Image: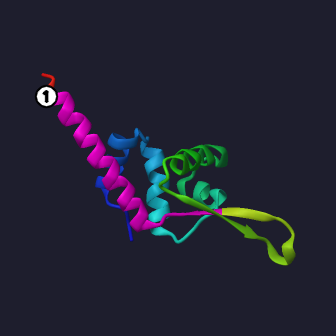
């Protein structure tokens, strides 16, 4: 499932996300789960830059991180994914809150 352009616009309006941060959301909507390195390759961005985007998205509660143990228990790595239903619910709640806030501001005019 691809995230529509409107989601990118909502991300900018509601969360202040940059187009690049929204691109991470789009990539994760299209894939089941990815490592930061994989997202960086897909987006043709530096790994540390993508890690910052991912951290911001996690802080907003829009993406999840799972720990994966490497074969034979030698180390681990993280994969990131989106629970699309929870993401939609969070965005709806944020949108409702944003709308109420803007309506209150409008009434002050």
Looking at the image, what colour scheme do you see? rainbow
Q: Residue at x 40, y 42 (%)?
A: 15
Who is closer to the viewer here, 20 or 98?
98
Extreme residue toward the top, this view: 109
Extreme residue toward the bottom, this view: 72
Main secondary structure type of the part rendered in magenta = helix
Q: Position of residue 40 (x, y in %)?
A: 60, 54
User: On the rendered structure, is 82 left or right of 68?
Assistant: left
Q: Residue at x 20, y 28 (%)?
A: 105
Q: Quadrant of the C terminus?
A: top left
User: On the rendered structure, is 61 left or right of 79?
Assistant: left
Tell me where residue 97 sits by quadrant.
Answer: top left
Q: Which residue is mark 1?
A: 107
Who is closer to the viewer here, 2 or 60?
60
The count of marks equals 1
Q: Quadrant of the N terminus?
A: bottom left
Give above or below for 5 relative to 29.
above
Dot 1 surroundings within 10 Å: few (below 14), some, or many (20 or more)?
few
User: On the rendered structure, is 43 left or right of 17?
Assistant: right
> Is residue 80 highlighted in magenta?
yes
User: Magenta part of the protein: which range?
Assistant: 79-106
Q: Position of residue 44 (x, y in %)?
A: 57, 52
Secondary structure at numbered mark 1: helix
Q: Position of residue 13 (x, y in %)?
A: 32, 41
Give above or below for 32 relative to 18.
below
Q: Position of residue 11 (x, y in %)?
A: 37, 47
> Is residue 44 highlighted in magenta?
no
Give above or below for 71 relative to 35.
below
Q: Residue at x 15, y 29 (%)?
A: 106
């Amino acid at each position: 499932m691809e995230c529509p352009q409107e989601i990118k616009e909502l991300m900018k309006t509601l969360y202040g996300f940059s187009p690049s941060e929204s691109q991470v959301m789009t990539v994760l909507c299209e894939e089941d789960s990815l490592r930061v390195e994989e997202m960086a390759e897909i987006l043709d961005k530096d790994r540390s830059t993508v890690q910052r985007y991912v951290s911001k998205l996690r802080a907003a509660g829009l993406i999840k991180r799972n720990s994966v143990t490497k074969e034979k228990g030698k180390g681990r790595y993280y994969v990131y994914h989106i629970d699309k239903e929870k993401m939609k619910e969070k965005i709806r709640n944020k949108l409702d809150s944003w709308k109420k806030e803007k309506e209150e501001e409008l009434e002050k005019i």
